[in-house]
């Protein structure tokens, strides 16, 4: 492999141009920020058994060993051994491990971004109990610091950090939100000074699935809870999380946190967006530096609670044979296991489960920002074939999920593969089958 | 006992009234102890009858006379003990009637008459400390006597672990600076018959084989005849099946010991000791230590006295001056090492954190990112 | 000389006495070897012997072996520097040979596979010497001379 | 001093010291790195998720149903030689006596002949493991000096142990000396290579299990 191969093929934004030395220094800085006793323990524990490969849909689809999850963090294992491991002084003294080069880092861009959805399935298979996905997330941070985040993710994260929106839109999302309200004849609670629940919305829904936005407004209205969107904290997604820019991720989360605090919300309700849930529920407090003064809940969790409390009643939904895709960030990585199924049960839906479901579900293939990376598409399509087959194998007529990114990915597959299934939003189904309470 | 013609052994035996059948019978017994094929007894009988009367000079140095006790403690004289104790032994200061200058004269005469042909048997180690003064006879040190006697010897047979390997005198701290014979005499064929003491049949059997064939027997790495020292006690031990079954006595007085189970855990050195105790046995084939319920102490092996406790099992750690590790000593050792490890570990963690800190907060001269 | 008690005289428990009268592995192997030697003898007239003292045998093994081989019809003793006993076992061609010294201690013990153990047979030179001795005796008798002592040992003194 | 005396004497002493020093160095060396508190509100109570962590130590011993088809055979191979190792190391009486001599307590062992059979089986599995390591594209790619050397050192102990038992190639005391010497080598190498996973396995599984349970996720 020639020396500049990595760099010349890297997928970089012009803003990320810098010298190789600066890249390595940046990677080491990012790495230093991430390394701690826990991540060190994970890197220490690997026994090179290769079993994690068998959890990864990229490896399963291609049988290409480079897609072995733990291999994706190889430069960071190397850096750990040389910089921070207990024997690091020996490694440096005797040169057992060389310094990671900028080229090697650039080569790994493909492995850390294009071929990893950060779905966490590998973390369930490792016999040593290593959370490989956590290591990949940390590695992405070092890659970001090295200026090696893929240009799509970099641009969106940068834009979102600056403006609150991952991309410029013809009309501000606030206006689009209100337009959706009038189009679907539903009241959009916006910028209330005080509310129990603060709402936010995936910009994917605004742009592609306005029905889901309306559905959220409708169920909130139906339940009669005090809730509001906030113009200054509207977008649920967090491209900082995808790109590995921890500071940007923090800044992006901060918009929502500050707005939730400003309106005195007790709950920040995460809409149908998986990675937003991870970013807010399981990472925001760490970046914020203290525990959040409100709860972070996924909309299905909220609805399931209302259901159990008897405040929400649902009609039977006529869906025919139905299956459900568990979004990785919500279920495997987020622990939202029961809520979606409780809602479906309440609507009388008997699921024909996928061969791998619940915590073991395969990723749709679009997670981790991969859907946004243009050059990753061919590999992504290969990896998701297995997922589509699993869905087909259930023979289900209706296919539900509860993450807008997953939906986008499946819709994209629908076009690419001329696939005959369409993913439906669980939230929309709930909104369509609300049963008036007390009657 | 000088003759103009060399007397054949057969003639001497006949004068002592030994019949052909007796001779075959004892040679059969000897062949058995030598681990020769059973049919060799008769062949040996014929060869021996035609052999010249051997001359044996027996020297005792720094020793306890246990070896000689063993040699003469055969319950009744076998043919080979008859040959060596009565017929051929031209000098042995312990056994011979003569004493003082007469004894010294007998030795000188035997060595002169049979120069180049006699077998020199030595028991005891050779002390070299204090100018050899720890062991003298007739005013001469054992080093001198040995060197002189070795000159005319056809071969030297070292009887007992002391002469073969230095034995107990050589054991730490070796106050007399004792050495085995092989360390003093370098230019003569040496056969070591180790053991503390050696089995009498092994001593006489070795001599017999040398006399019969005129050649050195097959020797192992410690110059011991393979015929007797080719197998470990463990390999030939009748308790071996219990070892294989994992049945071990845990004390000398437990049920396992009474059942005759393997004594490995009690420190038996059978697995690393090469001798014929388990087959030839002792006291005329009556028994041997393990059969009597005691462990093998490995007395036929070099340095047996310094290889840890007789009662600590072979597979245990053995270090320290006494050649033993105390139980739980490893915790002290490990604890000390672990403390050092903890300090170094903390140091390396501290260094890593410092480097982390520096990487996070690069100084101004380091490249800025865009 | 005061003797120690013989092992057989000390009342000890036999080790690992088989509960059901079965044979130990060592004894079975020995019997198998004997069978092989017997078959070879039948074909090639090749005598052989097994040295029992060179085998690691516990006291119980000996009892088992004796039980397995049994007693045959022939029993001979040789009185030469101690008693030797030659017993035919129940198995034809297998002889149990014990050599003891003058104190009765066992000095060699073999199982011989042969027609008759060689030590029993008279040697040719002994036979020749016997013939001469007998002639001398007859001659002496004829001359009414006193009988010369018959020496059985002067074979080697040619 | 003969080889056996050296192996179980000074060499063993040094090896044990290096082992203890190295293990503690390595563990302290990373445990004292920064520990960040997780400020995100746990889904389950601490007691509950720590319990789940302990549970994961057991459940992670065998692949989840969803993974078995792909990983079952490989994991079975891995675990079976580990079981073989455990039986050999911990249930062979001379080894028990060895440990007893160091630590002062013992436990019953298994028949030596059984151990020999297990050892031969384990040896075979060890060869199979190496074969898999060099032929499986993923494992070959991941493997480095540590993997091969750790394999070699462990293998050496098994081979010399078997040779000593079977008296193959040299005199028993020499083979026993080599066996103990190879174990000394293993002790010295232990803290510096992947053999350390013996110490990591339980806490690593427990921590991962607990952290997943903290989020309410399956582990």
Image: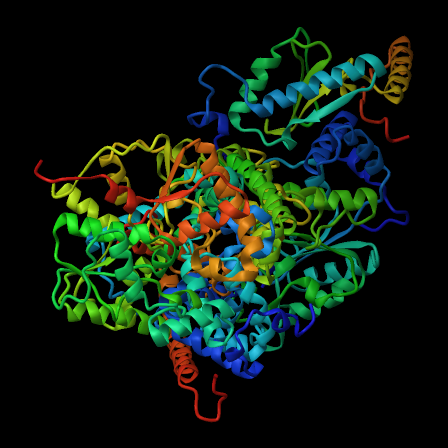
A73 lies above or below B247 = below
Closer to the camera, D60 or D6?
D60
Rendered image coloring scheme: rainbow
Relative image position of residue A342 (x, y in whole percent): 24, 39
* Residue D29 visible in the current orientation: no
- Residue B238 versus residue C63: which sits nearer the camera? B238
* Whether residue A422 is visible: yes
At a point 48% along the width and 84% down the height, the residue shown is B370
Up/down of B127 relative to A206, above or below? below
Give B163 or B56, whichever is nearer the viewer.
B163
Residue shown at 12%/57% (left/top)? A226
User: How many discs appear?
Assistant: 0
Q: Residue A368 at what x, y percent from top left?
A: 43, 59
Q: Residue furthest left?
A: A438
Q: Quadrant of residue B324?
A: bottom left
Up-down: is C129 above or below D199? above
Residue A385: % across, % down: 53, 44
The C terminus of chain A lies in quadrant: top left
């Amino acid at each position: 492999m020639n020396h500049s191969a990595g760099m010349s093929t890297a997928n970089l934004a012009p803003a990320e141009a810098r010298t190789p030395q600066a890249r390595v220094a940046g990677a080491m800085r990012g790495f230093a920020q991430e390394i701690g006793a826990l991540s060190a323990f994970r890197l220490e524990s690997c026994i090179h058994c290769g079993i994690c490969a068998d959890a990864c849909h990229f490896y399963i689809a291609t049988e290409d060993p480079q897609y072995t999850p733990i291999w994706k963090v190889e430069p960071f294992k190397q850096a750990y051994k040389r910089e921070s491991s207990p024997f690091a002084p020996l490694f440096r003294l005797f040169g057992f491990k060389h310094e990671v080069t900028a080229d090697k880092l650039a080569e790994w861009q493909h492995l850390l971004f294009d071929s990893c959805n950060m779905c966490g399935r590998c973390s369930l298979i490792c016999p040593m109990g290593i959370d490989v996905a956590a290591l990949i997330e940390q590695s992405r941070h070092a890659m970001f610091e090295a200026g090696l985040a893929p240009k799509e993710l970099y641009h969106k994260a940068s834009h979102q950090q600056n403006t609150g929106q991952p991309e410029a839109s013809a009309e501000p999302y606030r206006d689009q939100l209100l337009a959706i309200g009038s189009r679907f004849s539903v009241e959009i609670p916006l910028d209330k000074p005080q509310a129990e629940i603060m709402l936010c919305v995936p910009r994917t829904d605004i742009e592609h699935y306005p029905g889901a936005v309306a559905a959220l407004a409708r169920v909130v209205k139906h339940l009669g809870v005090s809730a509001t969107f906030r113009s200054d904290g509207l977008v649920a997604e967090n491209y900082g999380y995808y790109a590995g820019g921890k500071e940007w991720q923090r800044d992006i989360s901060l918009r929502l946190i500050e707005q939730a605090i400003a309106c005195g919300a007790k709950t920040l309700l995460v809409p149908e967006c998986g990675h937003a849930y991870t970013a807010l529920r399981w990472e925001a407090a760490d970046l914020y530096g203290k525990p959040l003064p409100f709860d972070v809940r996924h909309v299905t969790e909220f609805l399931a609670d209302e259901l159990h409390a008897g405040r929400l009643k649902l009609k039977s939904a006529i869906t025919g044979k139905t299956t459900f895709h568990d979004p990785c960030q919500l279920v495997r990585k987020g622990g939202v296991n029961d809520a979606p199924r409780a809602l479906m049960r309440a609507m009388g839906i008997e699921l024909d489960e996928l061969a791998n479901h619940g915590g073991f579900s395969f990723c749709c293939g679009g997670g981790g920002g991969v859907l946004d990376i243009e050059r990753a598409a061919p590999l992504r399509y290969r990896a998701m074939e297995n997922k589509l087959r699993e869905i087909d194998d259930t023979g289900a007529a209706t296919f539900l999920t509860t993450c807008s990114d997953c939906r986008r990915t499946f819709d994209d597959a629908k076009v690419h593969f001329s696939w005959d299934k369409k993913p439906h939003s669980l939230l929309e189904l709930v909104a369509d089958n609300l049963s008036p309470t007390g009657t | 006992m000088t003759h103009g013609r060399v007397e054949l052994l057969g003639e001497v035996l006949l004068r002592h009234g030994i019949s052909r059948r007796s001779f075959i019978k004892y040679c059969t017994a000897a062949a058995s102890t030598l681990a020769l094929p059973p049919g060799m007894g008769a062949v040996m009988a014929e060869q021996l009858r035609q052999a010249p009367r051997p001359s044996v000079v027996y020297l005792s140095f720094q020793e306890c006379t246990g070896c000689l006790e063993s040699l003469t403690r055969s319950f009744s004289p076998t043919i080979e003990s008859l040959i060596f104790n009565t017929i051929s032994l031209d000098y042995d200061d312990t056994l011979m009637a003569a004493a003082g200058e007469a004894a010294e004269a007998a030795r000188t005469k035997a060595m002169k008459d049979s120069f180049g042909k006699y077998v020199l048997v030595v028991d005891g180690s050779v002390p070299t400390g204090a100018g050899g003064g720890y062991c003298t006879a007739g005013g001469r040190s054992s080093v001198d006597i040995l060197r002189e006697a070795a000159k005319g010897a056809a071969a030297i047979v070292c009887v007992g672990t002391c002469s073969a390997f230095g034995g107990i005198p050589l054991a730490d701290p070796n106050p007399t600076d004792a050495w085995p014979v092989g360390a003093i005499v370098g230019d003569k064929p040496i056969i070591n018959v180790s053991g503390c003491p050696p089995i009498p049949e092994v001593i006489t059997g070795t001599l017999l084989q040398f006399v019969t064939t005129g050649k050195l027997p097959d020797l192992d790495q410690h110059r011991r005849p393979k015929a007797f020292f080719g197998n470990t006690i463990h390999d030939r031990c009748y308790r071996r099946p219990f070892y294989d079954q994992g049945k071990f006595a845990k004390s000398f007085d437990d049920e396992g010991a009474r059942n005759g189970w393997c004594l490995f855990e009690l420190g038996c050195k059978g697995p690393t000791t090469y001798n014929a105790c388990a087959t030839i046995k002792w006291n005329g084939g009556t028994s041997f230590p393990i059969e009597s319920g005691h462990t093998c102490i490995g007395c036929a092996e070099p340095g047996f006295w310094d290889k840890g406790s007789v009662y600590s099992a072979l597979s245990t750690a053995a270090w320290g001056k006494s050649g033993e590790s105390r139980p739980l000593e490893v915790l002290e050792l490990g604890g000390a090492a672990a403390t050092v490890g903890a300090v170094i570990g903390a140091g390396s963690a501290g260094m890593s954190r410092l480097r982390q800190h520096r990487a996070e907060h690069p100084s101004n001269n380091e490249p800025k990112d865009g | 000389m005061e003797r120690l008690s013989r092992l057989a005289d000390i009342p000890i428990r036999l080790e690992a006495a088989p509960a059901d009268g079965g044979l130990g592995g060592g004894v079975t192997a020995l019997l198998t070897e004997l069978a092989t030697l017997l078959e070879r003898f039948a074909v090639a007239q090749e005598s052989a012997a097994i040295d029992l003292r060179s085998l690691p045998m516990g006291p119980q093994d000996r009892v088992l072996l004796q039980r397995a081989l049994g007693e045959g019809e022939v029993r001979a003793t040789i009185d030469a520097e101690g008693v030797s006993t030659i017993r035919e076992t129940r198995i034809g061609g297998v002889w149990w040979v014990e050599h003891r010294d003058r104190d009765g201690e066992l000095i060699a013990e073999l199982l011989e596979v042969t027609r008759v153990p060689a030590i029993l047979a008279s040697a040719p030179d002994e036979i020749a010497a016997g013939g001469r001795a007998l002639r001398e005796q007859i001659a002496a008798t004829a001359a009414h001379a006193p009988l010369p002592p018959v020496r059985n040992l002067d074979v080697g003194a040619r | 001093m003969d080889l056996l005396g050296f192996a179980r004497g000074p060499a063993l002493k040094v090896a044990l010291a290096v082992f203890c020093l190295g293990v503690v160095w390595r563990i302290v060396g990373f445990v004292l790195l920064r520990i960040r508190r997780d400020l995100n509100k746990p889904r389950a109570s601490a007691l509950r998720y720590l319990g789940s962590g302990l549970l994961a130590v057991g459940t992670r011993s065998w692949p989840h149903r969803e993974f078995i088809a792909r990983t079952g055979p490989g994991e079975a191979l891995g675990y079976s030689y580990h079981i073989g190792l455990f039986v050999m190391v911990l249930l062979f009486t001379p080894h028990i006596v060895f440990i007893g001599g160091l630590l002062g307590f013992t436990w019953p062992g298994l028949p030596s002949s059984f151990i020999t059979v297990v050892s031969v089986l384990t040896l075979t599995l060890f060869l199979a493991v190496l074969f898999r390591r060099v032929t499986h594209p993923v494992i070959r790619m991941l493997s480095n000096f540590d993997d091969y050397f750790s394999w070699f050192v462990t293998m050496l102990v098994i081979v010399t142990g078997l040779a000593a038992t079977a008296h193959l190639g040299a005199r028993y005391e020499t083979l026993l000396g080599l066996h103990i010497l190879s174990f000394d080598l293993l002790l010295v190498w232990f803290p510096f290579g992947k053999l350390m996973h013996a110490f990591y396995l339980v806490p690593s599984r427990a921590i991962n299990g607990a952290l997943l349970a903290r989020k309410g996720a399956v582990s």
